[in-house]
Amino acid sequence: MTGGGVPGVRSPRARGVAVAAVALVVLAGGWWARVRCLDGGWVGGEQYYGYCYSDVAPLWYRRGLDEGAGPYGAEPLEYPPVLAVRIWLAAVLAHALPGTATVVTFAATNGLFVVLEVLAALVLLRRLGLGPGRLLWWAAAPALFLYAFYNWDTLPIVLLLGALLLHRRGRNTASGVVAGLGAAAKIFPGFLVPLVVLALLAGRRPRAALLHGGAAAGVFVAVHVPAYLLAPDGWDRFYELSSRRGMHVDSLWFLLARLGGPEPGPAALSMLSLGVFAAGAVAVVVLGARRRRPDEWWQLVLPVLVCFVLANKVYSPQYTLWLVPLMALVLRRAAPFVAVVLSDVLVHAVEFPHLAVREGYGEGLPYPVLGAAVALRAAALVWVAVEVVRHPPGSPPGRQPVPEVEGVPVQRDP
């Protein structure tokens, strides 16, 4: 997975088309895998035993999207404003198509958005300097097959990569705008902002640092204000539900509790999780920054994100999808990436039969099997974080330097 091209394809343009074709094949398979049981009513736990669960069906029926409700209706969407609007637009498109809108129609319109977002991420990765071999880490990723249509997280991935590209081109104010928009979709694109601010301050560019951070914060607030004005009782549903959520079976907290560790309530666990994440992120930045020039500190967004997903009280399946493009950009070698990919597939394979048992659908896999898989994935993610922090930046196989991207010179803010 470290090579410079697609076997048998020589032209750079043809290689790009080949990589895009691989992504489309993977997406077609992933869409079918999720949609094939949507119209069956999920009888007898087939969504678990058939590995076809997604958040599409529950949202369509339980949040009034099937009846044309907006993002902040009687049952507001439990997502931050940018994603809430994105999901609502897919529902609007489903109702605009000829015939009666169904959950399958909604899955199709949502799938169209996902395909465009995945291809946009592929373009951004190419402009960030990845060669065709590394682009396959994203285009052919098992996580793309498993999770692209599981949730809605391809959009914030695109926004993170867009903010990163703008930063590397020296357009830090625009980078802050896109990062702020990404944080208003899901929080993780916002993790780039403090790294860029610190890098600019270290480079004695306080005005650029202020513009970047201010742009990110300003956009984040500006997106939330209309949502608050339109639905003061519903705009913060995502944050409210997150604070009340307890530890889930796919998290390290649940594993520790099963091994005899503490079982704090949701509020205490939220504070504990935040504290562990903050400590891990600070350690990553302090240790990683020593081995890098400030203009390379953006690479630390990967281990910071690893700290976040490991410290979280829930490890939602799509979290691994967040990491894939960053691993392609930052890792020097393929081994840690392969370890994460394989261990994540293992978790996916054993988690859903276990969830079927928890929901009362027959006999499935006991928790110790899932706990072992979760521990293996955590070890692989720690390996990724250590690999990035310890090793100084170079030119990982398959990555090309990016002082200029496709002939466009770097532009720097003041």
Image (cartoon, grey):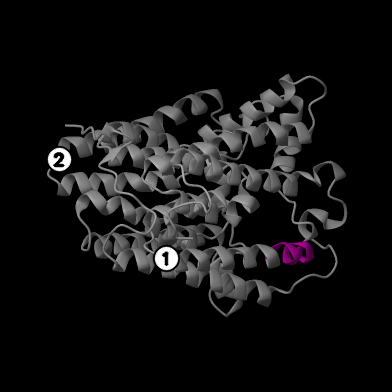
373 lies above or below 193:
below
The percent position of residue 166, horizontal first and vertical second, equals 32, 36
Task: Give me the disc on residue 15.
Answer: none
Picture quadrant of residue 59 = top right
Q: Amino acid at mark 1?
A: Val
Of residues 353 and 332, the one nearer the viewer is 332
Q: Residue at x 69, y 65 (%)?
A: 349
- For label 1, the crowd category at 10 Å Cα-Cα, with few meaning under 14, some 14 to 19 and many 20 or more, is many
The percent position of residue 117, horizontal first and vertical second, equals 54, 37
Query: What's the distance in space between the residues labelled 1 and 2, CA to CA?
Result: 31 Å
Say which element carries label 2. Answer: loop
The percent position of residue 213, horizontal first and vertical second, equals 28, 38
Say which element carries label 1. Answer: helix
Task: Give me the disc on residue 384.
Answer: 1
The mark total stands at: 2
Picture quadrant of residue 27 = top right
Which residue, as the protein is rendered here, is positioned at the far bottom? 260
Of residues 376 and 361, the one nearer the viewer is 376
The percent position of residue 381, horizontal first and vertical second, equals 47, 66
Please give the residue where the numbered disc 2 appears in the rendered image. 205
Which residues are drawn in magenta?
Answer: 351-358
Q: Amino acid at mark 2?
A: Arg
Tell whether position 356 is magenta.
yes
In this orientation, does residue 64 appear?
no
Image marks 1 and 2: residues in contact by CB distance under 8 Å: no
| Dominant secondary structure, magenta | helix
Q: Quadrant of the C terminus?
A: top left
Q: Residue at x 46, y 68 (%)?
A: 335
278 lies above or below 257:
above
Which of labels 1 and 2 is toward the front?
1
In this orientation, does residue 360 appear?
yes
Q: Earlier in the sequence, mark 1 or mark 2?
A: 2
